[in-house]
Amino acid sequence: MFRRLPTLLAGASARPTFEVHRLMDNPEDGHLTRVTYVKERASVVVSRFPQLGPRKEDPSDDVPQFDVNRRMSARFTVPEVATMLAVLESRVESAKITNPGVEATAARDGDGFALNGVAFTGPRSERKENDFKVSFDKTRTTQLYHFLEASLKDSLGFKH
């Protein structure tokens, strides 16, 4: 069911991954969104990497396009993935998802989907709050839906 996709970031795992690259002339507007299914932990990790600098001119340039050091990530468990699917299927308008690493709202955004909230980094005693905003357009929302559905089925042991 899952395909292994090539990735542009060094050190990335061979886990099932769904990526959206948004390269912009203004680096402040660009980012990479990566959704990864982690079978061993029955969870899905959503990460957002900011764009490092201007869009590359030379496709063979091996300088990284996205900043792995400023990554924002949130891990979602099976019930939280099911909650996101309920929003994607329009069974509920929006849903609040809270766990030790994130407080976010999952909601339809026009024809798309958005996760907006706060991600926590560092040990609990020194936790830092960081804005966590990830959005998907109509086409990517459909792809996200199928990816999350396959992740949920696999984590629950259903045959595809």
Image (cartoon, rainbow, N blue to C red):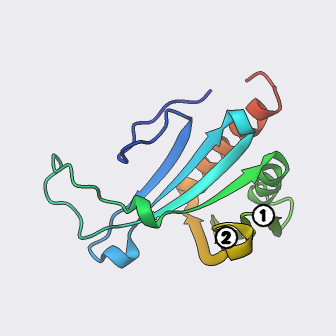
Q: Which mark is residue 100?
A: 1
Query: In the displayed structure, would residue 126 be above or below residue 74?
Result: below
Tell me if label 1 and label 2 are in contact, CB under 8 Å: yes
Q: CA distance from mark 1 to mark 2?
A: 8 Å
Q: Quadrant of residue 116?
A: bottom right
Q: Nearer the viewer, residue 117 or 128?
A: 128
**146 relative position to 50: left or right:** right
Q: Quadrant of residue 55?
A: bottom left
Q: Earlier in the sequence, mark 1 or mark 2?
A: 1
The C terminus - image quarter: top right
Query: What residue is at 55 percent from the left and 34 percent from the top?
Result: 15
Query: What residue is at 35 percent from the left and 46 percent from the top?
Result: 8
Query: What residue is at 78 percent from the left and 60 percent from the top?
Result: 87
Image coords of residue 126 (percent x, y): 68, 75
Disc 2 residue crowd, few under 14, some 14–19, many 20+, Cα 10 Å: many
**33 relative position to 22: left or right:** right
Secondary structure category for the residue under label 1: loop
Image coords of residue 53 (percent x, y): 26, 70
Query: What residue is at 36 percent from the left and 60 percent from the top?
Result: 66
Which residue is identified by label 2? 120
What is the total number of numbered labels drawn onto the structure image?
2
Q: Amino acid at mark 2?
A: Phe
Query: In the displayed structure, would residue 156 be above or below residue 127?
Result: above
The N terminus - image quarter: top right
Q: Nearer the viewer, residue 128 or 54?
A: 128
Image coords of residue 129 (percent x, y): 65, 78
